[in-house]
Structure formats: structure tokens, C-alpha cells
């Protein structure tokens, strides 16, 4: 059957989608091996495409990282919902969420650096990602504060940055489990209060 106008118009889109998927799969492998500072040109070469094709899909390193991280959302959403179901103590839920953020930010060596930078750069493709994490952290923090388990002067943004710091310390380049555990404990001691009765509850 000869190609119709519809099939002609679909072909470039399908080809573009294949290239996009190929870039993401290749970048996932490359960043896992070389960290987020790995060469984008090397990713294009490894994928067997021109650098121009890569940059048409992902104009910046941050745009590529944002797309890769979006593909990891499902597991994190599942963790978030399991902590939201009300069966977990609010302080433990907050701590569990922060630990999930630490693990998520450790997906690639060096990832905490562009994430930290994005918290102060609204134009970064990663800014929306970070904003979503701060918002979710605020939900868990508010619940812990209402329960009297978290200090009232603690901010969600600071906890998100603290989680990035923990992930950075746990990075392969440093690989110091003792320091990572110590920093996690120090972070929790900084936001947690001893359990106190909440007015109006028993």
C-alpha cells in the first residue's frame, strides 16, 4: 500500500521517538558508568547518532537528567504513597521519605550537584523536579510538626538540601558508609523533637 499523508507525517515522529528512547537508554548507561559529568558527545557517539540529534532532543545536560529522573518516578511514588497511608508514625514517615530522597539522588555519581544548583535556578529543567520534592517533603514535615515530632523552625527546603548532602557523601567517589550514616543521624537529630503531648490529644 502506498504511503498516505498520515503515514508520512507519523514516520518522522516515530523516528524521533526512537532516537529519544535510544538517547535515554544510552545516557542511563553512560551516567551510571561515568557520573553526570560524562561527555554528552560521547553519549551521542555511543548511541550511534550525531551530536546535533542529541541536542535537538535535550539542549542541556540538565534537560537530559530531568528526563532520565522522570523515568524513575514510579518507584519513588510507590514509596511516597506507602508512607502517606497513615499507618506510619509521622516522624518515621518523614525520615523514611528523606531516606528515599537520598537514595534517589544517588542514582548517578555527582547528581546532587546539579540538583542543588537547580534549587536556586528557576530556569533549570531540574527546578520543577526539585520543587516537587520540596513540596512533598513539606507535607511529611507538616505532619510531623503537627504531631509534635519535628521542630517548628525547620524548613522543607533545608531538609531536601540535607538529603542531597547525604547522597553526595555516599557517592562512589567518597564511598564512606560511616560518614553517610553519621550525617543521616545528625540530620534527624536536627529536625526531630522528643515526643511531646499535642494540645487537644488525650
Image (cartoon, grey):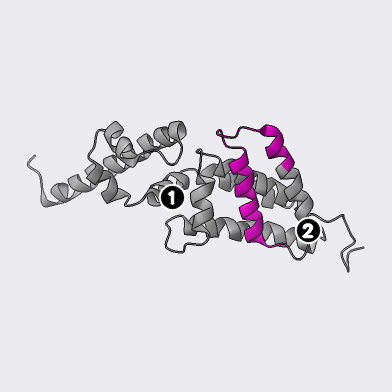
Give the crowd class for mark 1: few <14, some 14-19, many >=20 residues within 10 Å.
Answer: many
**Residue 171 locus on image (x, y percent):** 57, 37
In the rendered structure, the answer to whether residue 200 lies left or right of residue 96 reads right
**Residue 166 locus on image (x, y percent):** 64, 44
- Residue sitting at 52 percent across and 48 percent down? 113
Q: Magenta span covers which residues?
A: 154-182
In the rendered structure, the answer to whether residue 186 lies left or right of residue 138 reads right
Tell me the quadrant of the picture where the N terminus can be found.
top left
Mark 1 and mark 2: span between their CA atoms?
31 Å
**Residue 137 locus on image (x, y percent):** 64, 56
Q: Which residue is mark 2?
A: 150
In the rendered structure, the answer to whether residue 54 lies left or right of residue 134 reads left
- Residue sitting at 43 percent across and 44 percent down? 68
**Residue 2 locus on image (x, y percent):** 7, 42
In the rendered structure, the answer to whether residue 53 lies left or right of residue 166 reads left
Q: Nearer the viewer, residue 123 or 14?
A: 123
Amino acid at each position: 500500500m502506498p504511503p498516505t499523508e498520515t503515514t508520512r507525517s507519523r514516520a518522522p515522529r516515530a523516528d524521533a521517538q526512537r532516537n529519544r528512547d535510544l538517547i535515554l537508554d544510552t545516557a542511563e548507561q553512560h551516567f551510571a558508568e561515568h557520573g553526570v559529568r560524562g561527555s554528552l558527545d560521547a553519549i551521542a557517539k555511543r548511541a550511534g547518532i550525531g551530536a546535533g540529534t542529541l541536542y535537538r532532543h535535550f539542549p542541556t545536560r540538565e534537560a537530559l537528567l530531568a528526563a532520565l529522573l522522570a523515568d524513575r518516578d514510579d518507584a519513588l511514588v510507590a514509596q511516597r504513597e506507602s508512607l502517606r497511608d497513615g499507618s506510619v508514625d509521622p516522624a518515621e514517615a518523614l525520615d523514611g521519605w528523606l531516606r528515599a530522597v537520598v537514595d534517589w539522588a544517588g542514582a548517578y555519581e555527582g547528581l546532587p550537584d546539579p540538583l542543588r544548583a537547580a534549587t536556586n535556578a528557576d530556569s533549570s529543567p531540574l527546578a520543577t523536579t526539585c520543587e516537587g520534592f520540596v513540596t512533598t517533603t513539606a507535607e511529611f514535615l507538616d505532619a510531623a510538626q503537627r504531631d509534635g515530632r519535628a521542630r517548628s523552625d525547620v524548613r522543607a527546603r533545608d531538609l531536601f538540601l540535607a538529603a542531597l548532602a547525604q547522597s553526595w557523601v555516599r557517592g562512589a567517589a567518597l564511598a564512606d558508609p560511616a560518614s553517610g550514616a553519621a550525617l543521616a543521624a545528625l540530620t534527624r537529630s536536627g529536625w526531630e523533637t522528643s515526643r511531646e503531648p499535642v494540645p487537644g490529644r488525650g
